[in-house]
């Protein structure tokens, strides 16, 4: 099958159950209110694309290229970003739900997560250096052998990060977030005096 190349097109309310995306490369395209849940996005290249208000939950991302791709107000449950093409992976998230998604061993340096829900997301062995988690809910998110150097967590909440098994040098936390660094000690920290 021949691959297609699409540039600068807007896809509005596409439903992949009725009209699946064709394999190939999409550059400078915008996807608005599309239902791409459970769709097969494998081997597709997205370059400088934006997804707004889309549902991509449980989409297959095997060998999917995401280069300078922005996701806004998207539902993205259970995605496995470690299956994406590593070379050139560059993504940002704004008001998204990435709960139960996996970033296992994924290189996500300088990634912006803004007001995003990341319940039970897996960041095991990923590299998040210089990333920003701005007002994100990280309840149950898993960090183990994760590179968190210079990551900004100051406005985020509900995280539990063990400094003994993660690299957190020069990471930034608020005083209210410090209990999330001490969870493993099962101590009670009274924040009423703060």
Image: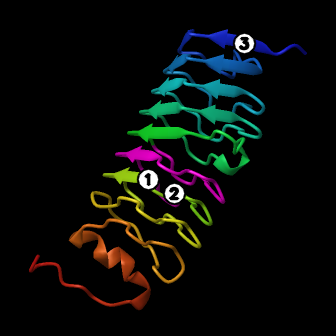
Closest to the observer: 81 or 126?
126
Taking the image as shown, residue 18 lies to the left or right of residue 47, namely right
Q: CA distance from mark 3 to mark 2?
A: 31 Å
Image quadrant containing the N terminus: top right
Taking the image as shown, residue 175 lies to the left or right of residue 122, namely left
Residue pictured at 32% horizontal, 90% vertical: 187
**Bounds of the magenta span?**
97-120
98 within the magenta span? yes
Answer yes or no: is residue 147 visible. Answer: yes
Write down the quadrant of residue 49 in the picture: top right
Residue under numbered circle 1 = 131
Q: CA distance from mark 3 to mark 1?
A: 31 Å
Taking the image as shown, residue 160 lies to the left or right of residue 65, namely left
Please report whichever mark, 3 or 2, sits nearer to the chain's N-terminal start. 3
Residue 4, compared with residue 67, is above or below; it is above
The answer to whether the residue labelled 1 contacts the one labelled 2, judged by CB atoms less than 8 Å apart, is: yes
Residue pictured at 44% horizontal, 86% vertical: 184
What mark, if any, has residue 5 been given in the picture? 3
Numbered disc 3: secondary structure: strand
Image coordinates for residue 29, horizontal then vertical, percent: 56, 16
Instruction: Give the residue furthest to the left.
Output: 193
Image quadrant containing the C terminus: bottom left
Residue pictured at 69% horizontal, 16% vertical: 18
Image coordinates for residue 147, horizontal then vertical, percent: 53, 66
Closest to the observer: 55 or 111?
111
Image coordinates for residue 17, horizontal then vertical, percent: 69, 22
Please report whichever mark, 3 or 1, sits nearer to the chain's N-terminal start. 3
């Amino acid at each position: 099958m021949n691959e297609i190349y699409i540039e600068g097109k807007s896809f509005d309310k596409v439903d992949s159950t009725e009209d699946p995306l064709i394999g190939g490369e999409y550059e400078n395209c915008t996807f608005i209110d599309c239902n791409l849940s459970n769709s097969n996005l494998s081997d597709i290249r997205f370059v400088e694309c934006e997804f707004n208000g889309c549902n991509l939950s449980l989409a297959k991302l095997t060998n999917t290229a995401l280069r300078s791709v922005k996701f806004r107000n998207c539902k993205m449950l259970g995605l496995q970003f470690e299956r994406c093409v590593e070379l050139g992976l560059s993504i940002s998230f704004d008001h998204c739900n990435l709960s139960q998604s996996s970033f296992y061993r994924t290189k996500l340096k300088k990634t912006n997560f803004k007001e995003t829900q990341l319940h039970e997301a897996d960041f095991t062995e990923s590299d998040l250096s210089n990333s920003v988690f701005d007002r994100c809910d990280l309840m149950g998110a898993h960090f183990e052998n994760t590179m968190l150097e210079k990551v900004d967590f100051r406005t985020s909440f509900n995280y539990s990060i063990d400094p003994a098994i993660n690299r957190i040098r020069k990471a930034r936390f608020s005083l209210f977030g410090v209990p999330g660094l001490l969870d493993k000690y099962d101590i009670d920290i009274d924040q009423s005096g703060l």
